[in-house]
């Protein structure tokens, strides 16, 4: 009997069962030098750049990271429609898929070299699919449904409906570019020797010469009053966020720094909420160390700070200033470049400036792929795509005389629901001011009208046989259904499908979102977006900001609100 008994599985481990990392106080009790960053006792973060021992050979004086290896991440997919479709002959279509939801499809005939190609873009609630397919690889010229299946096999619809609205390209490019931002805000935290708590970090009032030198390296000191550039949520009217800050322009991107010592200090407030409300709502922050004291990421309690770049100075205010650099981020933030050299030591100069700013911007893009931000971006994308779909449908019907005046939603017009896609887009932005969480969109608008064409139009989905897939001819391979193809003259699929293998697509508002996606959600101050919206569309009819469920929207108006989480409010932090 004893031989037949199975041993019981060990009990599940609790936090007390794990061997924790040493605490910062334990480390400080040892002999120096200390690492720039310590992991929290129970993990949750990763670290890059742990070696800071200078090399003995003289070649160590050479630039440690060639500029050619420094690459600023961009969302190139968001710019494809403007680059290849707008102002050129192309066709736009839309439809509804039971699993994928709203679909907006663009097709263009291209001649690349001496070969004919089809350039295809399919927008779903999860991502945008793009591909360029040689016509010579097709067994026959495909219809629109077959074209859509070539870029996304999960498409399962009977037909697409042509877009007949002359201003459609403006709406489509606005949707595509909503993820592009040229404005960034980063925190700058001053850590003195032996400071190990959030209260100590935010309680620093004086700036040492070494810290002042570093701030001058980061950018220009600007007066906030009446400042006209990107202000990153700082008050430029009443001086409630201090009198000055650090600002710079990097590769046509405006960057505002939230410097802890320049934000208002409140006597008697140990948490210094006036400082934390800004830095705690940033996603990436710099920690400047004047002396050798470890920084632990969980020193600062924040739901939004996901990455830190720790910089420790040596030989400050001399001709031989060097900076040691380490980077840490939460576990669900993917690695971002440029990679730190070994050892991670930089001389003060343009090479380090280029590296540091590229690292900061790429860090923010990478943080958007973390679970918290990815789900919010997916929900926002789904809401905007639904608005785009309805706007294209209603205006296409109006062009054919199939809908009344109350159904026509001109952009910026004063009829009916008032405002159309652009107004709904701005409301998604404005609604952030009523939220208790963080996420937002930068609103990129274009006033160019492209040449788009379509055929006959009838929107009465009836049951019809499924359209057969089109085959691709690839040398050495037999034709396969629905375009499962290999490389076609060096032009392959730019992005793979997001549908998880083995799982059926669903219509959830928040579902799996690709961790490879580059998304620049572009968090900005609420007031800035409102003012910019008024400048772009001063005649647009406005309605009161409120949260309305999508189920309550009118059948003849796509001008409705979306539940959307915001950032930058006094109550939206930590």
Image (cartoon, helix red, strand yellow):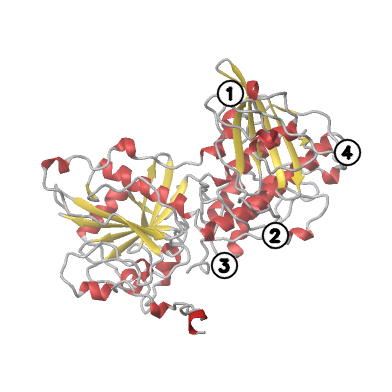
Whole-angstrom CA distance, mark 1 to mark 2, is 60 Å
Residue 268 lies in quadrant: bottom left
Q: Residue at x 49, y 57 (%)?
A: 370
Q: Which residue is mark 4?
A: 402
Residue 503 in the figure: left or right of residue 286: right
Residue 390 in the figure: left or right of residue 511: right
Q: Nearer the viewer, mark 2 or mark 3?
A: 3
Q: Toward the viewer: 79 or 318?
A: 79
Q: Nearer the viewer, mark 1 or mark 2?
A: 1
Q: Which residue is mark 3?
A: 436
- Residue 447 place in picture, x, y as percent: 63, 35
User: Can residue 159 be spotted in the picture?
Assistant: yes
Q: Nearer the viewer, mark 2 or mark 4?
A: 4
Mark sitting earlier along the chain (4/3): 4
How many residues crowd around disc 4 within 10 Å: few (fewer than 14), some, or many (20 or more)? some
Mark sitting earlier along the chain (2/3): 3
Whole-angstrom CA distance, mark 3 to mark 1, is 56 Å
């Amino acid at each position: 009997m004893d031989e037949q008994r199975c041993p019981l599985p060990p009990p599940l481990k609790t936090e007390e069962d794990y061997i924790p990392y040493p605490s910062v106080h334990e480390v400080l009790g040892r002999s120096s030098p200390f690492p720039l960053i310590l992991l929290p006792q129970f993990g949750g973060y990763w670290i890059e750049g742990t070696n800071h021992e200078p090399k003995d050979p003289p070649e160590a004086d050479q630039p440690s990271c060639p500029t050619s290896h420094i690459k600023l991440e961009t969302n190139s997919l968001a710019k494809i429609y403007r680059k290849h479709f707008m102002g050129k002959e192309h066709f736009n279509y839309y439809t509804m898929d039971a699993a994928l939801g709203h679909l907006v499809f663009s097709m263009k005939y291209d001649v690349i070299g001496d070969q004919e190609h089809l350039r295809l873009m399919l927008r779903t609630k999860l991502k945008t699919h793009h591909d360029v397919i040689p016509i010579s690889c097709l067994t026959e010229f495909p219809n629109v449904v077959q074209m859509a299946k070539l870029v996304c096999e999960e498409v399962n619809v009977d037909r697409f409906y042509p877009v007949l609205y002359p201003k459609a390209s403006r709406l489509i490019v606005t949707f595509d570019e909503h993820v592009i931002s040229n404005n960034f805000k980063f925190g700058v935290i001053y850590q003195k020797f032996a400071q190990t708590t959030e209260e100590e970090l935010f309680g620093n009032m004086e700036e040492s010469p070494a810290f002042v030198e570093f701030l001058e390296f980061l950018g220009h000191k600007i007066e906030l009053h009446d400042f006209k550039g990107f202000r990153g949520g700082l008050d430029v009217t009443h001086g409630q966020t201090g009198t000055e800050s650090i600002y710079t322009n990097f590769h046509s991107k405006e960057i505002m720094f939230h410097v802890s010592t320049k934000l208002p200090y409140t006597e008697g407030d140990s948490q210094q909420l006036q400082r934390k409300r800004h830095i705690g709502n940033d996603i990436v922050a710099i920690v400047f160390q004047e002396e050798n004291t470890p920084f632990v990421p969980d020193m600062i309690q924040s739901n939004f700070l996901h990455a830190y770049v720790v910089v420790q100075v040596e030989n400050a205010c001399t001709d031989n200033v060097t900076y040691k650099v380490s980077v840490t981020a939460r576990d669900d933030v993917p690695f971002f470049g440029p990679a730190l050299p070994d050892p991670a030591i930089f001389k003060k100069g343009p090479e380090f400036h280029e590296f540091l700013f590229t690292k900061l911007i790429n860090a923010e893009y990478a943080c958007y792929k973390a679970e918290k931000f990815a789900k919010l971006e997916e929900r926002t994308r789904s809401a905007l795509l639904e608005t785009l779909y309805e706007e294209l449908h209603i205006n296409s019907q109006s062009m054919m005389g199939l809908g009344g005046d109350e159904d026509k939603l001109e952009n910026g017009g004063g009829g009916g629901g008032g405002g159309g896609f652009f107004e709904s887009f701005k409301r998604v932005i404005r609604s952030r001011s009523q939220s208790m969480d963080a996420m937002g969109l930068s609103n990129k608008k274009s006033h160019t009208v492209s040449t788009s064409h379509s055929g006959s139009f009838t929107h009465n989905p009836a049951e019809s046989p499924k359209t057969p897939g089109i085959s691709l001819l690839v040398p050495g391979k037999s034709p396969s259904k629905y375009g499962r193809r290999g490389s076609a003259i060096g032009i392959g699929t730019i992005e793979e499908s997001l549908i998880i293998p083995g799982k059926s697509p669903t219509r959830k508002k928040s579902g799996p979102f690709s961790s490879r996606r580059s998304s620049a959600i572009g968090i900005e101050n609420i007031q800035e977006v409102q003012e910019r919206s008024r400048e772009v569309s001063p005649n647009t009819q406005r309605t009161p900001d409120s949260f309305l469920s999508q189920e309550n929207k009118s059948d003849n108006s796509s001008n409705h609100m979306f539940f959307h989480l915001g950032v930058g409010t006094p109550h939206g932090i930590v």
